[in-house]
Amino acid sequence: MKKHDCALFDLDGVIVDTAKFHFLAWKKIASTFNYDLTSNDNEQLKGISRSDSLQIILKMANTVIEPSKFEKYLAQKNLDYLDFIKDLGPEDILPGIFETLIFLNKRKVKIGLGSASKNAEVILSKLGLTSFFGIVIDGNKVNKSKPHPEVFLRGSSALGVAPEKCLVFEDSASGIISAKAAGMTAVAIGDPDKFLNEDFCYPDFMSLVQNDLDKLF
Ligand code: BG6
Ligand code: MG
C-alpha cells in the first residue's frame, strides 16, 4: 500500500461526535418551517457549510423565507449548536483518534484539519487537540465548501505535501468527493452505503486503528 506523508482530518463526525448536535440544531430550525428533518435528510447536510445547509433545508421544507431572515436563522442555529457543545471536553474525543495523532507524530507524518465548520478552532481547543495540528483549514478560510476540493488542497499546500501523498479521514459523502477531487487517498468512516468513491471504508475509527493504521503511513 502507498505510504502517506500527511493526514488531513475532517472534524465533525471523525474526531468528535458533534454531527449529532448539528442535526439537533437543524431539526429545531426545520420545525419552525413545519418540517420534520430526518436523520436520512441529515446525511445530505454532513460536510456542507452552514449557509448551504439552510438552503438545502428550505428546499426540503418547500419553504421560501425573506432574504433578510436568512442570517437570523443561521445565527439562531449556531447559538443552539454552541449551547449543545458547551460542555465538550477531551473525554469526547472519539476512540482511536488520540492514539492515531500520537502515532502520526512519532512517524513524522504532517497533520492538518480540513473542516467546513466555522467553529473548528473552538472545538479543537475544547478537546485539547490544537497543538497536534500543523494547519487548520476551516469554514472561515475557504471560498468553496465540500465537495469542492479547496479545503484539502489548501491544507496540503500549507503543509508542503503533494496531494497524492495526503490521506483524508472523512465521515461525509461530500468530503470523500472533495478528497478524491483533490487527488488524495480518501478514507471513509461509517456505513459504506453512504459513500460513492472512497478508497477505504471502516465502520469507525477504532477498527481502522486496530487493523490498518500501520499500512497507511
Ligand atoms: C461540517 C458539518 O463539519 O461543518 C456540517 O459536517 C456543518 O454539518 C458544517 O454544517 C458547518 O459548521 P458550522 O459549525 O460552521 O455551523
Ligand atoms: Mg464530518
Image (tube, helix red, strand yellow):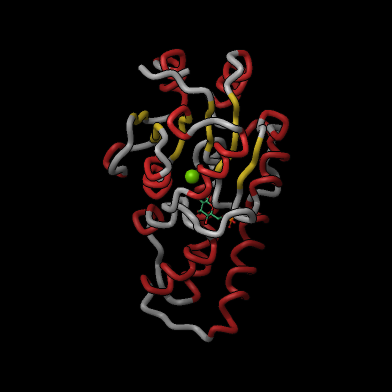
Closest to the observer, 120 or 157? 157
Q: Point out residue 97 in the picture as x, y percentages from the top left corner.
A: 56, 26
The residue at the far bottom in this view is 66
Closest to the observer, 48 or 88? 48
Residue 131 in the image: above or below residue 2? below
Q: Point out residue 18 in the picture as x, y percentages from the top left corner.
A: 55, 45
Q: For the point 29% across and 37% down, which residue is it? A: 192
- Specify whether 196 is left or right of 170: left
Quadrant for the N terminus in the image: top left
Q: Point out residue 145 in the picture as x, y percentages from the top left corner.
A: 49, 56
- Specify whether 111 is left or right of 52: right
Q: For the point 60% across and 26% down, which residue is it? A: 110
Count of numbered labels shown in the rendering: 0
Q: For the point 59% across and 32% down, which residue is it? A: 160
Within the image, what quadrant is residue 34 found in?
A: bottom left
Q: For the point 55% across and 46% down, which residue is it? A: 115
Q: Point out residue 14 in the picture as x, y percentages from the top left corner.
A: 50, 37
Residue 94 in the image: above or below residue 47? above
Closest to the observer, 161 or 94? 161
- Specify whether 57 is left or right of 102: left
- Specify whether 157 is left or right of 188: right
